[in-house]
Amino acid sequence: MISAKFKEVDIHIGDTLRVKNTIVEGEKTRIQSFEGILISIQGRGENRTIKIRKIGPLGIGIERTWPLNARNIVDIQVVKKAIKVRRSKLYYLRNLTGKMATRV
């Protein structure tokens, strides 16, 4: 199973993660969270990136990619562990709709 580490937190493909990152708007900064399924981990070393997918309003899929060593990432929490994942990339979730797109 493909996995990575972020500040002593082990993350695996298929886990539901909550990523908290800082957003700078003018002079103000705030923390925004993004919760979804980890569908891929790419690269190695400092170039390691993660791609997270969630189903937004009106059933539209939203994907975001972050470098694991980005300064704006405050915290990554594992909300739900994946039970049975047999692939290293979960790109097939892009073609599914409804509940099937959130079950791994």
Image (spheres, rainbow, N blue to C red):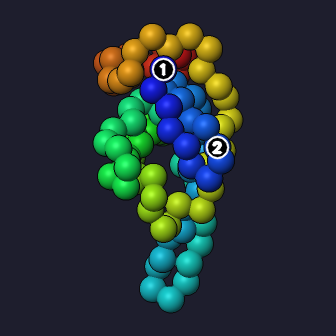
- Circle 2 residue: 9
As helix, strand or loop, the secondary structure at mark 2 comes to strand
Quadrant assignment, res 87 = top left
Rendered position, 19 above or below 31: above
Rendered position, 13 above or below 25: above
Q: How many numbered discs sit on the rendered protein?
A: 2
Can you see residue 1? Answer: yes
Say which residue appears at 55% left-offset and 83% top-offset: 28
Residue 87 placement, left or right of 30: left
Quadrant assignment, res 51 = top left
Q: Amino acid at mark 2?
A: Val
Say which residue appears at 42% left-offset and 30% top-offset: 39
Rendered position, 54 above or below 97: below
Task: Give me the C-alpha separation between circle 2 and circle 1.
Answer: 16 Å
For the residue pair 101 and 77, the one nearer the viewer reads as: 77
Say which residue appears at 33% left-offset and 38% top-offset: 42
Say which residue appears at 57% left-offset and 49% top-offset: 6
Quadrant assignment, res 80 = top right
For the residue pair 79 and 88, the one nearer the viewer reads as: 88
Neighbour class for label 2 at 10 Å: few (<14), some, many (≥20)? few
Residue 35 placement, left or right of 96: right
As helix, strand or loop, the secondary structure at mark 1 comes to loop
**Residue 49, position as x, y percentages in the image:** 37, 46
**Residue 82, position as x, y percentages in the image:** 60, 21
- Circle 1 residue: 1
For the residue pair 65 and 49, the one nearer the viewer reads as: 49
Q: Residue furthest bottom?
A: 27
**Residue 21, position as x, y percentages in the image:** 54, 61
Q: Earlier in the sequence, mark 2 or mark 1?
A: 1
